[in-house]
Structures are given as structure tokens and as C-alpha cells.
Amino acid sequence: MAGRRGKKAKFKKILIPLLKWISAIVPVCAFIYILYYYKQFDFLKPKAVVQSQTKIIGEADSSTSFVSSEKEALLKKVKVLENEWHSVGGIAIHSLVIENSSDKLIKNLEVEFKYLSDTQSILTSKIITLKTPLPAKKSTKISGVSVGYVNNAVVGCDIKVVNATL
């Protein structure tokens, strides 16, 4: 009978560590299978490099048909009379009064905003397109122009008209 107990003990000696290993491996395998089944192994694949290509379909800008001297003359006739701005949560909001002293309606206007520090050095420069039509020989008030995030060290703003579209 002693031999039988020895066989049971030897069986238990092998079976218990085997069950421990199986109970550790089976959940891991099940987890891997679930990831495979729901296609969650995307993190293992190399990321595709995003390539962008810009194609110009057509020139809608009528200012390109101008001679440069005519364009400069048009830009001299467009002036920013007032510029009131304040920062809301780091975003600059402008209220502008723009005067169009030319004879033609201006459809789009590109304005460059230069944000200055207390030493009058330029911290940030941004160009924004205003799509508000500006009637000929009139001043137009444009409010709520959001230029985007500006630094907290900004104390002033210079404005320059860069481009105008008829």
C-alpha cells in the first residue's frame, strides 16, 4: 500500500504545478485571442506616413490680374481706422473699423496682425482673411474677429493690410 501513496504523491507533485502554470497561461492566451478577434493589434503595425499634396484648381483671386502698381495703389486706399482688441482665455478678439476709399467693392481682405511685447518687439505675427465685403467709399465695422492664441506677454498689436480681392 505504501507504493500506492507514493504514486499519488508523485502525481500530485506534478499535477499541482502544471495546474498553476495552466491557470496562469490560459487567461493570457484568452486575452490575446480577444485582442486578435476584435482587431486591436493596430499598435504593432508601423504608422503610415501622411503625405499631403496641394493642387491649385483655379485662381479665384482677382488681385493677381492687377499690375503690382495698381495693387499697391488699392492697398493704400484701404486703411484700418480703429483696432480694439482684448484677450479672452489667451485668444485675441478684435473689433476693427476698416475704410475702403477706393471706387470698387472689396470682397476679401488679408490683414496681418503683429503682436508686440512691452519692448515693442514682435512676439507673434498672423495673417487672417476677412471675408466681409467692404463697400466703396465707406467705413465698415467688423467685430468678433478671432485671430487665435496669443501669448500673455502681448501688450500691443500692429495691423497691416496685406492683400485685397475685388
Image (cartoon, rainbow, N blue to C red):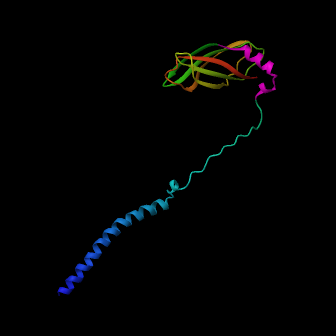
Q: Residue 77 falls in which quadrant of the image? A: top right
- 129 magenta-colored: no
- Between 15 and 30, the residue placed more toward the observer is 15
- 72 magenta-colored: yes
Lateral position of residue 22 relative to residue 150, left or right: left
- Between 97 and 13, the residue placed more toward the observer is 13
The picture places residue 62, in percent across and down from the top left corner, at 78, 26
Number of labelled discs?
0
The picture places residue 59, in percent across and down from the top left corner, at 77, 32
Please say if 28 is above or below 5.
above
- Quarter holding the C terminus is top right
**Magenta-tinted stretch:** 61-80
> Which residue is pictured at 60% across the width and 51% down the height?
48
The picture places residue 6, in percent across and down from the top left corner, at 21, 82
Main secondary structure type of the part rendered in magenta: helix
> Which residue is pictured at 25% across the width and 76% down the height?
12
> Which residue is pictured at 73% across the width and 20% down the height?
106
Q: Farthest residue in the left direction? A: 2
